[in-house]
């Protein structure tokens, strides 16, 4: 018997890791949930622990009258090891708090924390932590790169995909408690009875997981769906129409969350079509929702063709309206003043509307960051915005403190992320894109968690076989560096919106589309000429810098003080301008693009060490996508440098790798895809 042992061991050692299609995300096996033993939500919590928890016995305590627990809210919880050391109690004033407590306990165990003496008390930073799906009712996903929509509208409500429950579970495990099911470019049909029945079916599945359903609405639904002659928000018949529509929605979905509205933006209808304001539109909907405790998330993403600097327009339209919105209206503001670029300064609206609840909108889907081909961990981008000091009332008025309600008290606080989820087996396309979904939830729950902490947690739960040292390397040298690398190979030094027309995937700084809006073209933003590069938004230019509080307005305004990573956002900088390290602007640009390429090559090298520590399926998937990313990084570098060289007339420093593509080839190359697909690969000629 003894003599066989080495053979058995050898057999174990060469066994490959089981193939993993990534469908289980960061989670362990889903438990079978018995129906209604305690309550649907507590049943899930206790089944999760029964399946996944290996420590002391756990009790749940729902204590609605406890002052301490009430202060933590219905989602907050306390986890304590019992005094006798023989058990653990999770207590909360709400059932969802018990569920979140259970997931926290599992996370602690699964990330290797010491669970022997627990005394934890948690309260979410934001009351509403919401995913925005840009899913269309025809099954496509605007800016979605992970397949088709997860919602099989044609089959609902009769056929229920098991993924609906898995989706709710994944969200609950990271504290996400709301989902807007449909695109902000909304079809009026979403409010038809036919669709409300389908939405009810989803809401019923999500409810025990604490996940509320919200809908994007089309402002002209009274006309388009209701057959009214107008959608004027001050018209009595329009108010009545919305009132009865809302009543109908709540008859199907008693805990419906509310509406998300894109109005008078990018050609969509809105109150301004009738000479009314955003306040008139938002308040009319808020009044209809108020009796049912619903909210309105009204987007500030507005800009008109031909007007002033696009980056200034949301501020110009919304700041004069401060203090006029109903209490259940929250203005949803994109993190930057333009549109989810790899780097933007924070939107100056944060800190400028003290009497209005504002919620940040981040983009989890990678519209401008390589779709699901590029590995870009987005938490550092979001944290950069949240940690930005707006100086709205002296120092310390960060975007986080303003929006989480701690600085200016607002009855509701919220945060939104545009989802990167589709019907792909692994949900998000790129295996590492799952980290962005995870990070959004964790950050919305606790805005003070660092990007490193979140990346570390995610890696431990998602790639369990990695050694400690390789895990740290992947966290610190790939994930934590990936956003900056993308900025470097796409839009360094504050450049922005240089992506191709329409699909926004590759570089097209030269892009010209006859008849197109200038502010949809890269040249509007980079303004390359024989003198230099960048958009003058200083007091000598569009004066967007004046929208920031002091001292930021002066810092951004003066070329010598402006942070170099935003210098071309705020200034038109001469090619020969001396940067802080002594290089000219042109040389600095060449070095940055080159750094971006080198970084991705390093990611490839580090990832190659994961062979054998990660299952073969996910290993090769990531390896394959990193190859695309490395090729694309070279494409971006060559396209941008060769194009800008036409203006600078300066050589690419000889110490640097030289371009491998011809500019004319790249200018003649077009990817033929719709907005709704992930490009299979970049420029490969
Ligand atoms: C949903 C950008 C995107 C659009 C998107 C829009 C928005 O313009 O390219 O696809 O539309 O932002 O956020 O409304």
Image (cartoon, helix red, strand yellow):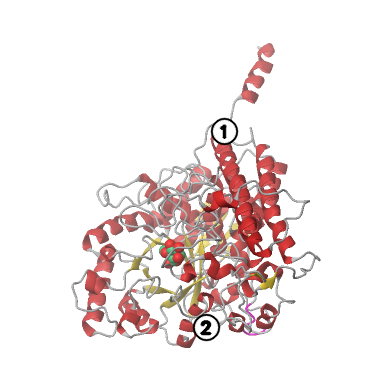
Q: In this view, does 676 lie above or below 550?
A: above
Residue 393 falls inside the magenta stretch: yes
- Which mark is drawn over residue 32? none
Q: Position of residue 212 (x, y in %)?
A: 39, 62
Q: In which quarter of the image is the N terminus?
A: top right
Q: In this orientation, which residue lies closer to the viewer: 46 or 129? A: 129
> What element does badge 1 sit on?
helix
What segment is highlighted magenta in the picture?
390-394
The quadrant of the rendered image in which ligand 1 is seen is: bottom left
| Residue name at image x 46 percent, y 68 percent | 64
Residue 473 falls inside the magenta stretch: no
Q: In this orientation, which residue lies closer to the viewer: 444 or 223? A: 223
**Which residue, given by chain and number where applicable, does mark 2 sit on?**
353
Residue 357 in view, yes or no: yes
Q: In this orientation, which residue lies closer to the viewer: 427 or 246? A: 427
As measured in the structure, the alpha-carbon distance from the residue carrying label 2 to the one carrying label 1 is: 51 Å
Q: Using residue 358 as the reference point, say whether residue 586 is left or right of it.
A: right
| Residue name at image x 26 percent, y 61 percent | 196
Q: Is residue 656 above or below residue 611?
A: below
Mark 2 C-beta closer than 8 Å to ligand 1? no
> What element does badge 2 sit on?
loop
Residue 335 in view, yes or no: no
Q: How crowded is mark 1: few (under 14 residues within 10 Å), some or many (20 or more)?
A: some
Q: Position of residue 301 (x, y in %)?
A: 46, 73
Q: Which of marks 2 and 1 is nearer the N terminus?
A: 2
**Which residue, given by chain and number where applicable, does mark 1 sit on?**
616
Image-quadrant location for residue 526: bottom right
Q: Position of residue 575 (x, y in %)?
A: 71, 68
Image-quadrant location for residue 201: bottom left
Main SS class of the magenta portion in the image: loop
Q: Using residue 259 as the reference point, say whether residue 21 is left or right of it.
A: right
Determine whether label 2 and label 1 are within 8 Å by CB. no
């Amino acid at each position: 018997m003894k003599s066989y042992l080495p053979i058995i061991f050898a057999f174990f050692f060469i066994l490959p890791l089981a193939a993993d299609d990534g469908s289980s995300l960061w989670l362990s096996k889903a438990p079978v949930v018995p129906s209604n033993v305690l309550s649907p939500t507590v049943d899930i919590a206790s089944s999760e622990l029964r399946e996944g928890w290996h420590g002391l016995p756990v009790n749940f305590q729902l204590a609605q009258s406890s002052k301490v627990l009430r202060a933590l809210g219905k989602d907050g919880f306390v986890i304590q090891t019992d005094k006798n050391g023989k058990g653990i109690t999770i207590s909360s004033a709400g059932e969802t708090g018990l569920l979140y407590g259970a997931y926290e306990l599992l996370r602690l165990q699964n990330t290797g924390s010491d669970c022997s003496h627990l005394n934890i008390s948690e309260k979410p930073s934001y009351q509403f932590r919401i995913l925005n799906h840009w899913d269309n009712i025809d099954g496509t996903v605007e800016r979605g790169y992970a397949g088709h929509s997860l919602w099989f509208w044609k089959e609902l409500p009769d056929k229920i995909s098991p993924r609906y429950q898995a989706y709710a579970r994944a969200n609950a495990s990271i504290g996400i408690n709301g989902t807007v099911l449909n695109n902000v470019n909304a079809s009026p049909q979403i409010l038809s009875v036919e669709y409300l029945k389908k939405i009810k079916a989803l809401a019923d599945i999500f409810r025990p997981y604490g996940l509320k359903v919200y809908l994007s609405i089309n402002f002209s639904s009274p006309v388009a769906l209701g057959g009214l002659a107008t959608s004027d928000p001050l018209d009595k018949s329009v108010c009545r129409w919305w009132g009865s529509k809302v009543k109908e929605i709540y008859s199907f979905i008693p805990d419906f969350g509310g509406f998300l509205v894109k109005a008078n933006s990018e050609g969509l209808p809105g109150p301004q079509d009738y000479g009314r304001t955003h306040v008139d539109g938002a308040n009319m909907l808020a009044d209809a929702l108020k009796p049912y405790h619903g909210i309105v998330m009204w987007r500030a993403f507005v800009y008109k063709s031909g007007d002033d600097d696009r980056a200034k327009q949301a501020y110009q339209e919304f700041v004069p309206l401060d203090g006029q919105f109903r209490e259940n209206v929250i203005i949803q503001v994109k993190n930057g003043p333009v549109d989810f670029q790899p780097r933007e300064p924070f939107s100056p609206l944060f800190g400028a509307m003290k009497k209005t609840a504002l919620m940040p909108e981040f983009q989890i889907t990678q519209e401008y960051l390589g779709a699901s081909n590029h590995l870009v961990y987005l938490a550092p981008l979001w944290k950069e915005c949240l940690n930005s000091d707006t100086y709205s009332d002296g120092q310390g008025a960060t975007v986080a403190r303003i929006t989480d309600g701690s600085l200016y008290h607002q009855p509701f606080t919220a945060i939104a992320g545009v989802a990167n989820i589709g019907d792909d087996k692994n949900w998000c396309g790129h295996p590492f894109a799952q980290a962005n979904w995870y990070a959004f939830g964790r950050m919305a729950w606790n805005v003070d968690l660092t990007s490193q902490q979140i990346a570390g947690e995610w890696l431990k739960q998602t790639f369990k076989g990695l050694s400690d040292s390789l895990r740290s390397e992947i966290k610190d040298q790939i994930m934590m560096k990936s956003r900056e690398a993308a900025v470097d190979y796409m839009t360094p030094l504050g450049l922005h919106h240089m992506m191709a027309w329409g699909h926004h995937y590759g570089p097209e700084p030269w892009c010209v589309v006859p008849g197109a809006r200038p502010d949809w073209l890269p040249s509007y933003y980079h303004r390359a000429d024989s003198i230099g590069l960048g958009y003058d938004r200083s007091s000598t230019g569009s004066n967007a810098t004046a929208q920031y509080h002091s001292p930021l307005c002066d810092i951004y305004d003066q070329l010598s003080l402006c942070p170099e990573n935003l210098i071309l956002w705020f200034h038109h900088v001469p090619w020969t301008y001396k940067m802080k390290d002594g290089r000219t602007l042109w040389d600095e640009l060449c070095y940055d693009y080159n750094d971006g390429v080198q970084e991705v090559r390093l990611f490839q090298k580090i990832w190659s060490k994961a062979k054998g520590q990660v299952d073969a399926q996910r290993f090769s998937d990531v390896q394959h996508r990193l190859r695309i990313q490395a090729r694309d990084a070279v494409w971006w570098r060559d396209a941008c440098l060769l194009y800008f060289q036409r203006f600078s007339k300066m050589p690419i420093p000889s110490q640097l790798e030289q371009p491998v593509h011809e500019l004319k080839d790249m200018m003649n190359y077009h990817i033929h895809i719709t907005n709704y697909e992930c490009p299979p690969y970049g420029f490969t000629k």
